[in-house]
Image (cartoon, rainbow, N blue to C red):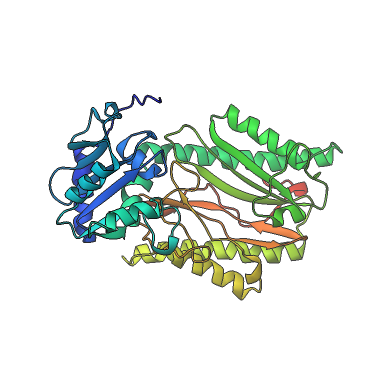
Amino acid sequence: MAVVEETVSLTAETVRRIQEELRAHGVDGWLLYNFRGNNPIAGDLLGLPAMTRRYFVFVPTEGTPVALTHRIEQQPWRGWIGENRPYSSWKELDAELSRLLGGVGRVAMEYAEGDAVPYVDRVPAGVIEMVRATGVEVASSGDLVSTFYARWTPEGEAAHRRAAVVVQETAHAAFRRIAGQVRAGEPASEWETREWIQGEFARRGLKVGADSIVAVNGNAANPHYGPTADDHAPIREGDLVLIDLWGKESEESVYADQTWMGYVGEEVPERIRTIWAAARDARLAACALVRDRWAAGEAVYGYELDDAARDVIVERGYGEYFIHRTGHSIDRELHGSGPNIDNLESRDTRRLIPGVGFSIEPGIYIAGDVGFRTEVDVFMGPGGPEVTTPDPQVEVFALLAGEPAA
């Protein structure tokens, strides 16, 4: 039998802030549920690992939080600041859940109607049925998740900014290395470059989740292409090279995630410059919209930035080749649980609130031909949205002309 030794870490101050948000959102409480780690939002908020039995935690708008916990897993609740109601049988759990929610009208849970936002839709349908059977209405906790799970801590922000410098400098150094190899007539490849990047990340302290995509020409037209030791392309003069790379310092850090592009030649061909400009201008349009809304004191939502970027690419005639959302939430996870920049794969109607971060990464992928992506990270700081990627790319680098400069 597995033994869980950690202890719950939800604090009174966090409960107070949650209750303020609950009142602002017009719900009667936040009902957290977890079983075997299927809801990492609940686990991380409470400071608990995956456990072998179901538990519920109810944080009401007023009063003391209540936990429904299994009798054989009591040790992790030693630091619990609220009321603990143990159960053993499923009948007992059903009865305790009904008692807990008696008189409650509406609760927030990690649920999204129609699976509209998969990153929030963590609670199984059967558990939602259990809660609704008590007469309670279930609302999405999406905005609460953004506030209490996806926001960057000051330490996380500082780690992200350090990682952003390492990622940018490593990408630029990789391009210079490719240029040197090609000039010297030495073999260069997607896989060998990716392995070199891995070594640089390890040397410079990006030790968690660090990896990269190095893709040339038609391989770059596959957004999630990954070279392997046995299946990769050489890099030669005349190739277009995409490098997407990401990583963070520790488990508690925030990721940096960037994509850069270079052409192995003295001058970038006109066609490549034209297609690139569509992707770049889409990125700039999304960044401009979030800045303009902030300056006007108006709310802005993830789906709106996706629309702003997509409109540019459609207008330039490449709409059919932009086959993914414009960006994703970034927090302690590379693809975080906050608002995504998405009105394609899903319609993310969550507001971009202060403290959250996300990528802006429009792409154009012409299968069998060539692929483009330009990616920066944005942080909704106290002074407004900020692109945290150092010196965002403006033009495709001409690698044999000495770009990017050291």
In the rendered image, the quadrant that contains the N terminus is top left
Q: Is residue 86 above or below residue 216?
A: above
Residue 17 visible? The answer is: no
Q: Residue at x 32, y 50 (%)?
A: 147
**Residue 325 vs residue 340: left or right?**
right
Query: In the figure, is residue 360 to the left or right of 382?
Result: right
Residue 130 x, y percent position in the rendering: 30, 53
Q: Residue at x 60, y 75 (%)?
A: 315
- Residue 106 horizontal side relative to residue 33, left or right: left
**Residue 342 is at least partly visible in this image:** yes
Residue 366 lies, in percent from the top left, at 72, 63
How many numbered discs?
0
Quarter of the image holding residue 295? Answer: bottom left
The residue at 66%/74% (across/down) is: 317
Res. 371 image quadrant: bottom right
Relative to 1, is 46 above or below?
A: below
Left or right of 322 on screen, residue 248? left
Q: Residue at x 83, y 49 (%)?
A: 237
Q: Assign the C terminus to one quadrant of the image.
A: top right
Give the quarter of the image for residue 166: top right
Considering every residue shown, the one lying at the far right of the view is 185
Return the residue nearer the eye: 270 or 365: 365
- Point out residue 324 in the picture as x, y percentages from the top left corner: 58, 61
